[in-house]
Image (tube, rainbow, N blue to C red):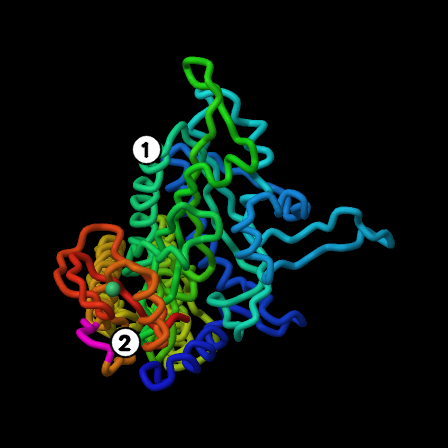
């Protein structure tokens, strides 16, 4: 199904063929999570919860509706979101005095309450997160998981005594992110956004970007340091040890269902999805190879194998439907199950189980007696290989750019002096979006591609999804 030739069409076809989503809901950009798609999202949410809980964040759940009066407290914030907001204007038959909006993100829902929760330095740091749906009226073409109007969303919100402590939170967020991305086998870049592209109201924004097979970049999440930009308008203050009142410094970290879209886009191939074992609803599918006279024996052995693997904590599907093995292979390939096991009479007599890896297509056989350990280690190898393959493709996709004469259809790396004027000129002339400079140090020496001034860090740009 031509992933390389027409990525966009391939993507749309795959999410439907694999039954990850149902787009027939009568509101554009609001899709149904099907059981298979939702299972994948839930595994991702589970890893997010594990990481947040382990780092002392508490899960909360704030109301979906925000009063207009709170939303308007931070000027840049409202300017940034105004055009994307859904409004509630009536309650029953009555027009509301104060309009309510569906959260596009939760700063203005949470911070009036944080002002009540935070009193003393002993209340800090306050570390919270929630997994909720947010709503943004997207005007660009919608796309399942990648650009939708109701968004399954993770957001952490923290308050700290000062800028330095909030900075430590940003660093901790990078570790949380890395651990989650390990499960998803996704490569990513941490790029500090330009001043004109940072989150509305943020002191700075670090974007988490991954690269798509068509050379575009996809933002998967972002981490923001707010300094006192929100605590001042919302009055989030605390009393320090000397009895002085100070404003809290804040951070947020957000990611969304785009993670599912990225998994589809980065790992999938012409046969369908390729799911990382850690988030695949089924890690193993067992296909019985039946022939006349051995149906009962083979079925029984396959059941036994399924029970053993399940007892060992693996997620296993035994496909004992009436379809032919060939069409079963095909169906589970589309759905991206990492490992297929096959057992027929010949395998059983020889004490073997045949296998096929979804990621590389490699086939082989393992000893039946040793199947649990073999399957476990194969799944580890698959995860490892998927990470390496995706990383290599991501590095390959980047091209160094020395001049503005010819602009490749790729992600580009180049020198930029940091001046807004040069940055804007670059974006105008190339039609690319500046993603920013690496948050972590990256060896580089070059010249600003616009004004020629010497620079020591690179900047990245791409067509963005
Ligand atoms: Zn310049």
Q: Position of residue 347 (x, y in %)?
A: 25, 70
Mark closer to the observer (1, 2): 1
Residue 161 found in image quarter: top left
Residue 9: which quarter of the image? bottom left
Identity of the residue furthest to the top in this view? 242
Residue 72 in magenta stretch: no
The correct choice, above or below, for 217 with respect to 190 in the image is below
- Start and end of the magenta stretch? 399-404
Instruction: Give the vertical position of 201 relative to 24 (above or below).
Output: above
Residue at (50% x, 70% y) in the render: 144
Q: Which residue is mark 1?
A: 164
The front one of 447 and 323 is: 447
* Mark nearer the N terminus (1 vs 2): 1
- Pick the front one: 357 or 438: 438
402 inside magenta stretch: yes
Q: Is residue 261 above or below residue 213?
A: above
- The residue depicted at 24 percent of the width and 83 percent of the height is 406
Q: Main secondary structure of the magenta part?
A: loop
Per the image, the residue denoted by label 2 is 410
Q: The C terminus appears in which quarter of the rendering? A: bottom left
Q: Secondary structure at mark 1?
A: helix
Q: Provide the secondary structure element on which disc 2 rests.
A: loop
């Amino acid at each position: 199904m031509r992933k390389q030739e027409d990525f966009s069409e391939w993507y749309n076809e795959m999410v439907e063929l694999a039954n990850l989503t149902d787009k027939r809901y009568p509101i554009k950009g609001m899709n149904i999570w099907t059981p298979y798609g939702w299972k994948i999202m839930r595994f991702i949410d589970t890893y997010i919860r594990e990481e947040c809980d382990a780092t002392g964040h508490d899960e909360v759940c704030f109301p979906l509706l925000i009063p207009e009066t709170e939303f308007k407290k931070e000027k840049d914030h409202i300017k940034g979101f105004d055009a994307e907001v859904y409004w509630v204007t009536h309650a029953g038959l009555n027009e509301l005095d104060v309009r309510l909006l569906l959260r596009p993100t939760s700063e203005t829902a949470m911070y009036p309450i944080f002002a009540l929760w935070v009193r003393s330095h002993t209340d800090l740091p306050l570390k919270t997160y929630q997994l909720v749906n947010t709503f943004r009226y997207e005007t660009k073409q919608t796309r399942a998981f990648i650009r939708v109007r109701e968004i399954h969303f993770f957001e952490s919100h923290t308050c700290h005594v000062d800028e330095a402590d909030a900075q430590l939170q940003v660093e901790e967020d990078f570790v949380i992110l890395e651990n989650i991305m390990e499960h998803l086998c996704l490569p990513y870049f941490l790029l500090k956004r330009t001043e004109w592209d940072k989150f509305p109201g943020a002191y700075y924004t670090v974007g988490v970007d991954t690269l798509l097979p068509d050379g575009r970049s996809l933002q998967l999440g972002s981490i923001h340091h707010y300094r006192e930009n929100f605590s001042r308008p919302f009055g989030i203050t605390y009393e320090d040890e000397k009895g002085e009142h100070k404003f809290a410094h804040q951070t947020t970290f957000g990611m969304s269902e785009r993670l599912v879209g990225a998994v589809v886009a980065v790992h999938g191939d012409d046969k369908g999805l390729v799911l990382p074992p850690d988030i695949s609803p089924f890690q193993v599918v067992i296909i019985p190879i039946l022939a006349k006279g051995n149906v009962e024996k083979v079925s029984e052995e396959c059941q036994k194998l399924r029970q053993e693997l399940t007892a060992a904590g693996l997620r296993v599907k035994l496909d004992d439907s009436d379809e032919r093995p060939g069409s079963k292979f095909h169906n589970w390939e589309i759905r991206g199950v990492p490992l297929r096991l096959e057992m027929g009479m010949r395998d059983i007599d020889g004490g073997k189980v045949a296998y096929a890896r979804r990621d590389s297509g490699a086939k082989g056989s393992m000893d039946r007696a040793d199947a649990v350990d073999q399957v476990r280690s194969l799944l580890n190898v698959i995860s490892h290989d998927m990470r390496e393959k995706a990383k290599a493709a991501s590095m390959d996709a980047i091209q160094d750019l020395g001049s503005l004469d010819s602009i490749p259809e790729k992600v580009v790396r180049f020198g930029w002096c940091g001046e807004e004027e040069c940055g804007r000129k670059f974006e105008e002339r190339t039609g690319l979006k500046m993603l920013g400079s690496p948050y972590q140090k990256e060896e580089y020496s070059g010249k600003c591609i616009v004004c020629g001034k010497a620079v020591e860090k690179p900047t990245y740009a791409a067509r963005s999804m």
